[in-house]
Amino acid sequence: MTAPHRPPGHLPSTRDRLLLAFADLASYGIEAHPALGTDPDTTRMHLRDAILAQYPQATGSYIFWTTPDDHAFDHNGELRHPLTLHHSGAEVARATHASLAQVGLRATAAEPPATLSIPPHPNQACTSPDSKGSARAIPPQT
């Protein structure tokens, strides 16, 4: 598969920017995986077990989206639908918000707990956790 043509000066796709954010999270020891597994609960369990088997003293921090959710991206890597990210807890949510902001993306807290949602339109208002892990509103960028 060839990469889509983008004019000079055009921002990387949402998928590319999300992968950069995931690389940033991985540099801090958070297991960050695109398109992993089909069932979030089963994937959480397997990922946590794999982390702890390799690193018994680890906190087991992770974030991922599922393989079926990978279809939220169009052929250019732009979101057509909200993308759900599954994470291990408030500390990962805070780190994810920071990493996403660095690449011009935002996420909202979602249901069920320990999930974030990236909207298809990145200028949409979102929430970010405060120091206690509770959500607080962030206005959209203009």
Image (cartoon, rainbow, N blue to C red):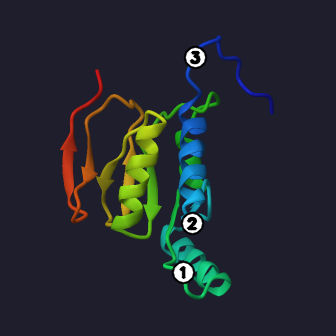
Mark-to-mark CA distance, 2 and 3: 31 Å
Label 2 sits on a secondary structure element that is loop
Q: Earlier in the sequence, mark 2 or mark 3?
A: 3
Label 1 sits on a secondary structure element that is loop
Three-letter amino acid code of the residue under disc 2: Gly
The crowd level at tag 1 (other Cα within 10 Å; few <14, some 14-19, many 20+) is: few
**Residue 66 visible (yes or no):** no
The crowd level at tag 3 (other Cα within 10 Å; few <14, some 14-19, many 20+) is: few
Measured as percent of width and height from the top left, residue 123 is found at 34, 28
Label 3 sits on a secondary structure element that is loop
Q: Where is mark 3, residue-wise?
A: 10
Q: Where is mark 1, residue-wise?
A: 58
- Closer-to-camera residue (123/41): 123
Q: Earlier in the sequence, mark 1 or mark 2?
A: 2
Measured as percent of width and height from the top left, residue 14 is found at 53, 34
Q: Earlier in the sequence, mark 3 or mark 1?
A: 3
Which residue appears at 46% of the width and 47% of the height? 99
Which residue appears at 58% of the width and 38% of the height? 15
Measured as percent of width and height from the top left, residue 20 is found at 59, 43
Q: Where is mark 2, residue-wise?
A: 29
Q: Is residue 37 left or right of residue 1?
A: left
**Residue 19 visible (yes or no):** yes
The crowd level at tag 2 (other Cα within 10 Å; few <14, some 14-19, many 20+) is: some
Three-letter amino acid code of the residue under disc 3: His
Q: Is residue 130 above or below residue 18?
A: below
Measured as percent of width and height from the top left, residue 142 is found at 28, 20
Q: Is residue 113 above or below residue 58?
A: above
Q: Is residue 59 above or below residue 141?
A: below
Which quarter of the figure has residue 106? top left
Q: Is residue 73 left or right of residue 126?
A: right
